[in-house]
Image: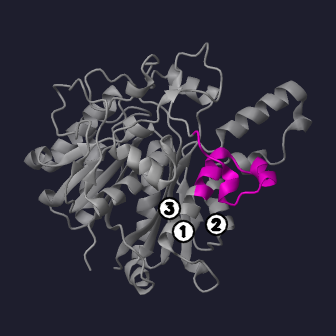
Amino acid sequence: MRRVVVTGLGMITSLGTGVEKSWKAIKEGKTGIKLIESFDTTDNPVKIAGEVRDFEPTEFGMEKKELKKLARNTQFAIAATKMAIEDSGLVIDEKNENKVGVIVSSGIGGIEVFEDQHATMIEKGVRRISPFTIPAMICNMASGNVGIYFGAKGPNKAVVTACAAGTHSIGDSYEMIKSGRTDAMITGGTEACITKFAINSFANMKALSTRNDEPGKSSRPFTADRDGFVMGEGAGILILEELESAKARGAKIYAEVVGYGETCDAYHITSPSEGGEGAVRAFRMALEEGNITLDEVDYINAHGTSTPANDRNETAAIKEVFGEHAYNLNVSSTKGATGHGLGAAGGIEGAILALSIAEGVIPPTINYDMPDPDLDLNYTPNEMVKKDIRVAMSSSLGFGGHNAVIAMKKFKD
């Protein structure tokens, strides 16, 4: 089977547009979570989120007249793809266009388009609904538009598995290259659902933090007083390539993708199975595919949502898989910095995984000031750690019982 490497990255998060802005802030323990500015939250129970505040789509080749056809999540995807392609130096032309594919996923898609156009229908009548509504809002259009904008004619699809979608996309892309169906993939996740309807829908589930008086401390993975996740938005895009073609063009290599696991809890529509049983199987699947021994793993970028159930069960899963070695490795959740990007989370965290390996840096779990006595792993509290990382893993666990885990290792020729 062919080897697969990461050669380009693009990121948009609440910490800033661009890999450099986001990654620098994550390493420094900063957060992009603030009071919501994009709509009036006066009567809302949740007033906080990780909004992207510095994004201008026209700076990334999108014409102003075209924006009405592109939902915000699609705009993020196009922009992050442009960054990733430029970072990788990959040229897509008639020689390789059929062997470059796209899997860029969202959990919800263009929900702001749906909300806006539904309001238009109620207020002004059905004839005022924009004809661009459907092609703007449906979940596959981020991936479809990336193919259109960059001329990638290989396999193109979107995976819709809630918070696991971005990691499933990377894993599926890895398998496509490994099996020879494609030579390169544009992959990751994108999401933009910080809207009145979406925020309040999650709030009514009691899934979100209500720590409105301390926005910067509201996302608190693995702490005793965690009270829910904080919505984020943005995109994380990776360029994956077959190793020999990447080497032939002199591409820089961040890391090698070596394993992928995907399972279903078959348990509950929102709650993870007790003990993280589904996550356990996904971790083991990725380890087996990568031929990775437990003691080779140095870092896990956890799903770490800051919800009581996720953090407890994910910790249990890591301990079940790694046994005593669980206490030797570093675990961290970067959602305290970025917020939880839903379908974008796995893409953003996949990019963070590659950067961590390339730089030998483990990003911190911020706001870790009240340890939960039942959660006793090394969560890399509050400050980054410099460490030579041999193998790192990223886990994403979505509503519906969807579990996805990827493994990357330090590249050695």
Three-letter code for the amino acid on which mark 3 is drawn: Thr
Q: Secondary structure at mark 1?
A: helix
Q: Secondary structure at mark 2?
A: helix
Image quarter of the N terminus: bottom left
Q: Residue at x 44, y 74 (%)?
A: 241
In the image, 69 versus 274, the foreground residue is 69
Instruction: Check residue 86 in the rendering and tell me which mark sits there, or answer none.
Output: 1
Q: Residue at x 39, y 83 (%)?
A: 247
Q: Is residue 52 left or right of residue 248?
A: right
Three-letter code for the amino acid on which mark 1 is drawn: Glu
Mark 2 neighbour class, 10 Å CA radius: few under 14, some 14 to 19, many 20 or more = many
Mark 3 neighbour class, 10 Å CA radius: few under 14, some 14 to 19, many 20 or more = many
- Mark in front: 2 vs 1: 1
Q: Is residue 296 left or right of residue 301?
A: left
153 up-or-down from 237: above or below: below
Q: Secondary structure at mark 3?
A: strand
Residue found at the far top of this picture:
43
Three-letter code for the amino acid on which mark 2 is drawn: Gly
Q: Which numbered disc, 1 or 3, marks the residue that appears first in the sequence?
A: 1
User: What residue does disc 2 label?
Assistant: 147
Instruction: Check residue 187 in the rendering and tell me which mark sits there, or answer none.
Output: 3
Image coordinates of residue 104 in percent, x first then y, are: 54, 57
215 up-or-down from 162: above or below: above
135 up-or-down from 194: above or below: below
What stretch of residues is rendered in magenta? 53-79
In the image, 100 versus 59, the foreground residue is 59
Q: CA distance from mark 2 to mark 3?
A: 11 Å
